[in-house]
Each structure stands twice: as C-alpha cells, then as structure tokens.
Image: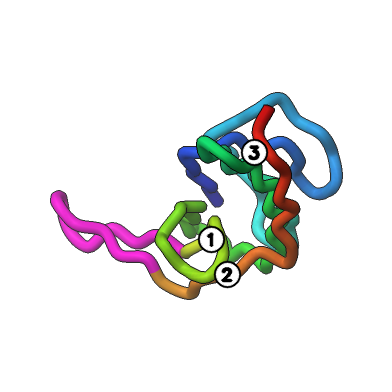
Amino acid sequence: MLVITSYPVTQVDGNAVESSYVLELAPGPHSLTVVYQTYQWNYRCQFEWEADADQRYEVVNSDNVHPLTLYRWVRINSLWAARYDPVNPISCEKRTTG
C-alpha cells in the first residue's frame, strides 16, 4: 500500500519520521501526521484510516472544509486518475508561521 503527498509526513502510527512524501505501508489501520504550510499558517493534520491492500492513497489540498484530505487514488488510464473515498483529518492544529 502506497501513500503519496506533496506535503511532509512527520509521524506514522504515532512514531516520528524524517519528512517523507512517499510511504509504503502494510494494509491495516494507520495514522499519519502531515504538515501543510501556507504563507500565514502551519497546519498539522492527523489522519486515521483503514488502508486496503494493493491501493494507493494521496493527501492533497483540495479546497475542502479542511486544509488537507486523504483520498484513495485510482489510475483510470495513462492520462487520468480519480480520487475516491475521502478521509477528513481527525484534527488540524493551526499555528502562525514564523
């Protein structure tokens, strides 16, 4: 199972990790902390979800209610992919930048 993000992952299953943008995890329950930085704010968003085998997941800023959302990512063809099954963060801690 693969997780891809444009934002650094700082914790996996409660354990600190070096900032990573691609993770390979076993199927099952997982938690991630992802840091999303804007000009004015830093958000530390935590996700919890049950990861399925042979799936890809993606954490993106998709202009939803929350700063980041986790999706199951599926390739449609050589040019297109689709995002399914959105998972909202269980928390997003907002701090000022600087």
Identify the mark at residue 94; answer none if there is no mark.
none
The quarter in which the C terminus is drawn is top right
Q: Could you tell me the amino acid type at mark 3?
A: Val
Alpha-carbon span between mark 3 and mark 1: 12 Å
Q: Is residue 28 above or below residue 13?
A: below
Q: Is residue 17 left or right of residue 26?
A: right
Q: Mark 1 Cα within 10 Å, few/some/many (few <14, many 20+)? A: many
Alpha-carbon span between mark 3 and mark 2: 16 Å
For label 2, the residue is: 87
Work out whether mark 3 precedes mark 2 in sequence or the reverse, and give the earlier one: 3
Work out whether mark 3 precedes mark 1 in sequence or the reverse, and give the earlier one: 3
Alpha-carbon span between mark 2 and mark 1: 5 Å
Q: Is residue 68 magenta?
A: no
Residue 38 location (% of width, % of height): 52, 40
Q: How many marks?
A: 3
Do the residues under discs 2 and 1 have CB atoms within 8 angstroms? Answer: yes
Residue 16 location (% of width, % of height): 81, 34
Work out whether mark 2 precedes mark 1 in sequence or the reverse, and give the earlier one: 1
Front residue (pair 61, 55) = 61
Image point (57%, 39%), residue name? 40
Image point (64%, 38%), residue name? 9
For label 1, the residue is: 70
For label 3, the residue is: 9
Colour pattern = rainbow
Q: Could you tell me the amino acid type at mark 1?
A: Leu
Q: Mark 3 Cα within 10 Å, few/some/many (few <14, many 20+)? A: many
**Element type where label 1 sits in the image:** strand
